[in-house]
Image: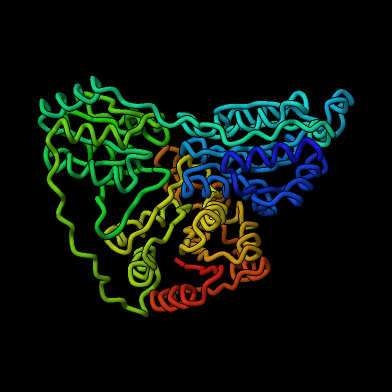
Amino acid sequence: MFAAESLVRTLINQGVEVCFTNPGTSEMHMVAALDRIEGMQSVLCLFEGVATGAADGYGRMAGKPACTLLHLGPGVGNGLANLHNARRGYVPVVNIVGDHARHHLELDAPLTSDVDTVCEPMSRWVGRVNDPSEVSSMAVEAVRQSYGPERGVASLTLPADCAWSDEEPDVLEAQPMPGPNPVGANTVSAVAEAIKAAKSPVLFLGNDACLEASLETAGRIAEATGAQLFMDTFVPRISRGQGRVSPRRLAYFGEQALEELAGSDLLVIAGSKPPVAFFAYPGLPGELTPEGAKTVHLGGPADDIGQALNDLADALGADTPLAKPERSQAPKLFPDEKLNPGYVGISMLRHMPEDSIICDDSTTSGMGVFPWIDNGPRHEWLCLTGGAIGSGMPQAVGAALACPDKQVFALCGDGAAAYTLQALWTQAREKQNVINIVFANHSYLVLNVELSRVGAGEPGPAAQQMLSLDNPKMDWVKLAEGFGVPAQRAHTAGEFDDALKAAIQAGGPHLIVAEI
């Protein structure tokens, strides 16, 4: 046995069951260890951004980390964007990166880089194995750090010679992992008093406060106190659908968000932080708390916000069960109408199986789908938490690994999908029940909007070309089929509805091009 085997066995003992990988020479002993040892599923990805995005999707749905296995500084560099999304979503990920053997680093070979520093901006913790005897203890520490209490990306650098060493470190059994921090009784009491004193309070939810049980509690608090329920624009995971409480999603554009919150005199922050604009704009504020409104914090991402909401409900006497609205009925479909995001939402309302998972990487188009299925089939909606596009298809890979019995959807803009379309190959190889919906508007549509909002003037020919994807247009049917995924194109509401129904019935991976 070589040291890498101890590392893998130790990870398995800590509950790490999946490895998303794109390895190289420095990681071959880890590859061999994964081959020899049962208990961890290895999933090959053609691009590191797919591996890290898949680990993000897996962590959101499984509630525990998967690991990655990446090749040196350039490999982890390729995966940083989706590690950023995981970091902003407080998702547990164990990011293992191979490095040159310790004695080889001094030779400054072509692939030599400062791996630890490359990992650092997207990680809540970075560690390095400095001796083969440390591989098991460092593996445990990486898993522990991914759990937090503020969950996130824990990166572990593994030099090749520490992996290939014939030294046999002890395989460590399951170790206790940290949970969220408890919220004190004094905090709960102070928040309750602030709500009672407010004339127009807002309960502002984020992160774990948007999971089903916490939403139910927040709904009871709102019903008892008259508070408005809002949530962050981009939340790691939102439990939605018939019978679930539905907070209002804060508008993306800052001035619209300020209008929505206008008149409130108290913001209770539950699981998040006070709202801010996604970008800075000339002459517009970045902070979105209304002028004169007070802000109180019930808890943040590191805190047990579910229990804190329960305690707050008790303090406010909010114990009346909520009435459940009737399930939404799909409006009449006009099959010959030109397709738009709303019709996609209507078709999902008509056909989406209960307890589906939706990975949203579609920016503008996803906002058109979102309201239609609010009170439809139960589902989990995963948002683009960090704003780094290219998350949808990889995230769907991870979600499907975590929940193989669920139907998974990836909603992708065509520009975003082009970042990480290699995920289609992994979906095909793993025979996953993922339906990829690519909204083909043949442009970076949101950037066309942003160009005018930042006051940069009317776009000329050069600017238009930088934001256009129609010269040439990508053929998503051929691209998908080239990666082994069946695909078809839909121009009308009826064509899309038929394609979606057929894809769900067939099972396995599919891609539907929504020409909008």
Which one is in front, 422 or 17?
17
- The structure residue drawn at horizontal position 65% and vertical position 33%, both measured from the top left corner, is 172
**Residue 458's x, y, as percent?**
45, 45
Work out whether 62 lies above or below 136. below
Image quarter where the C terminus lies is bottom left
Q: Quadrant of residue 301?
A: top left
Residue 334: image quadrant is bottom left
- Picture layout, residue 35 above or below residue 138: below
Q: Residue at x 28, y 25 (%)?
A: 297
- Residue 244 place in picture, x, y as percent: 26, 54
Residue occupying the far right of the picture:
107
Q: Is residue 132 left or right of residue 88?
A: right
Q: How is the image coloured?
A: rainbow
Residue lying at 85% horizontally and 34% vertically, measured from the top left: 166
Left of 299 or right of it: where is 6? right
Is residue 508 visible in the rendered image? The answer is: yes
Name the residue nearer the viewer: 332 or 64. 64
Horizontal placement of 69 versus 273: left or right? right
Question: Residue 403, percent across and down?
Answer: 49, 57
Instruction: Let me know if residue 440 appears in the view.
Output: no
